[in-house]
Image: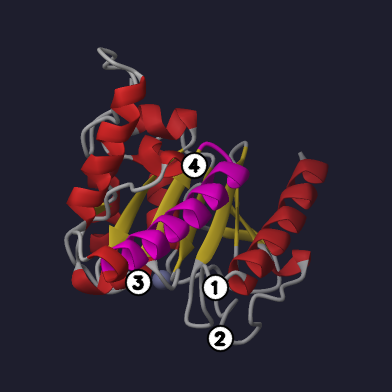
Amino acid sequence: MDSKIADVREQIVVIGALMYARRLTDSAGGNISVRVGDRICITPRYAGSQFRWQLKPEQVVVADMDGNKLEGDGEISRESAAHFLAFKTFPEVGAVVHGHAEHILVFASLAQPMPPVLECTRKFGEIQVVDYAPAHSMDLAQNLIGKLQGQEARIRKQAAALISPYHGLFAFGRDLDAAYDTLERLDINAFVLLNDHAYSGKTGADISSRMEEGIAAYFPGSGEIRPAPAGGAEK
Ligand SMILES: [Zn+2]
């Protein structure tokens, strides 16, 4: 278990730096957590503002399931409530990645859901926006967990993601690779959708349904390739 925790702390450092370099989060915040048995490894407070996501493994905090710090140089991230609540509520969740990803922030600032416009993001369905509650609050954690209900199959397969209004994205994955991959894919989806709209004037809903029609034309009569409805479990 100790060597597993050491490995995970190193992986979190690598993913944090990558997330920052790829503008999937910023100096203002973001956080990463991973379940290892009955322990949670989670990024420290001020990972962005003081350390610009250049962390050392010993700064990644190791905590119990109730959020009590057991080890680590820093304090637990202020936004940890949603992470711990997700791990406690859903055995499917192996990692949580939260980022202020630059293109997704457009949807967050408009409090608008984001439809998939690429083959690689269809499996996530339309990314829903949770009700507003301030960053770091237990209300926000509960709003996120409420909207994860029914998306367990998505988490088992890869991840489910939600937009926190005026704030950012939370990806709840089966493991760290899956959660990070989800954040990156969804930010690319946001980038493409915004440019599609600027280029063609079409709405996200139009672009998404045109994609579905294009794909369905290849699979006539098959319902299997249709994405699950927003919030619904994927078959
Ligand atoms: Zn945040």
Range of magenta residues: 174-197
Q: How is the image coloured?
A: secondary structure
Of mark 1 and mark 2, the one earlier in the sequence is: 1
Residue position marked by numbered label 2 in the rendering: 49
Q: Are marks 1 and 3 in contact (CB under 8 Å)?
A: no
Residue 189 is covered by the magenta coloring: yes
User: Compared with residue 116, is residue 228 higher up or lower down, i.e. above or below?
Assistant: above
Q: In this view, does 27 lie to the left or right of 58?
A: left
Q: At label 4, which amino acid type do we have?
A: Gly
Mark 4 vs mark 1, foreground winner is 1
Residue position marked by numbered label 3 in the rendering: 105
The residue at the far top in this view is 221
| Residue 158 location (% of width, % of height) | 49, 35
Residue position marked by numbered label 1 in the rendering: 23
User: Compared with residue 145, is residue 100 higher up or lower down, i.e. above or below?
Assistant: below
Gap between marks 4 and 2 measured at Cα: 25 Å
Q: Residues within 10 Å of mark 1 (few under 14, many from 20)?
A: some
Of mark 2 and mark 3, the one earlier in the sequence is: 2
Gap between marks 4 and 3 measured at Cα: 20 Å
Toward the viewer: 98 or 67?
Answer: 98
Q: How crowded is mark 3: few (under 14 residues within 10 Å), some or many (20 or more)?
A: many
The rendered magenta stretch, by its main secondary structure, is classed as helix
Q: Kindly state the secondary structure of the residue where label 4 is placed.
A: strand
